Image: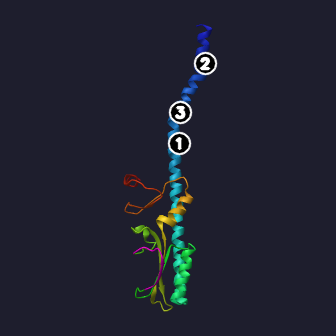
Amino acid sequence: MTLRWRLTLGFVLVVVLPLVLGLLLLARGLPQAVQARQELDAVSQARLMAQVCQDFCERAKTVAELAGRDGATSDAVGARAVAASSVKRGLADGISLTGPTGAIFFSVGRLPDSPVDCADQLRGSREPFVSAIVRLTTAKGQVAGEAVASFELSTTLLGKLALAIPDGDIVLVSPEGTAVASSRPFDADVVTDA
């Protein structure tokens, strides 16, 4: 074997063979690593979204309790003015207060037609709102009415989620599998496949 062949063989064994092996390992390992990272990111973002939704539920419950207390301690005009101010400042997208018979004392902002309490929302609601319903009682335990505070999913909640997850597309899906709100239009197949 001549020197030229020995040098060529040495070059192939020392340089080319490790490069080819490295490329093969990279070609097999990189997609798996990327997929694992994407799965971790999806889980992390889903947890973040769940926490944001829970925070909105707690916020709506607090606003509903405040509306109920204010309605009990002031006249209807004053309670309505306070509720309107709360909606204007972004504490909720809508607030309503009803009496023991179901008569509406006031309703301010955007509210669902038939609100479902966010604690029960996991059981299913087609309304695009996160609502908190607080049952109001007298000191003797008698029903005094109901206070409702709501956030609209397609505006307020979706906007906050988009800020929290700036590089992701967001679709809020009902327990039945229908898209309630999304950051951009999606095909029904995308939601079904997810």
Coordinates of residue 77 in the picture (x, y in percent): 52, 87
Relative to residue 14, is residue 61 drawn left or right?
left
Give 138 or 1, whichever is nearer the viewer: 138
Q: Quick one: label 2, few (<14), some, or many (20+) residues within 10 Å?
A: few
Q: Are marks 1 and 3 in contact (CB under 8 Å)?
A: no
Q: Amino acid at mark 2?
A: Phe
**Residue for badge 1:** 33
Q: Are marks 3 and 2 in contact (CB under 8 Å)?
A: no
Residue interval drawn in magenta: 104-113
Determine the image quadrant of residue 15. top right
Instruction: Name the N-terminal-most of marks 2 and 1.
Output: 2
Give 17 or 68, whichever is nearer the viewer: 68
Q: Quick one: label 3, few (<14), some, or many (20+) residues within 10 Å?
A: few
Residue pictured at 50% horizontal, 40% vertical = 31
Residue pictured at 56% horizontal, 77% vertical = 86
Coordinates of residue 154 in the picture (x, y in percent): 47, 64
Q: Amino acid at mark 1?
A: Ala
**Residue for badge 2:** 11
Residue at the bottom extreme? 140
**Residue for badge 3:** 25
Q: CA distance from mark 3 to mark 2?
A: 21 Å
Coordinates of residue 1 in the picture (x, y in percent): 58, 7
Give 109 or 192, whichever is nearer the viewer: 109
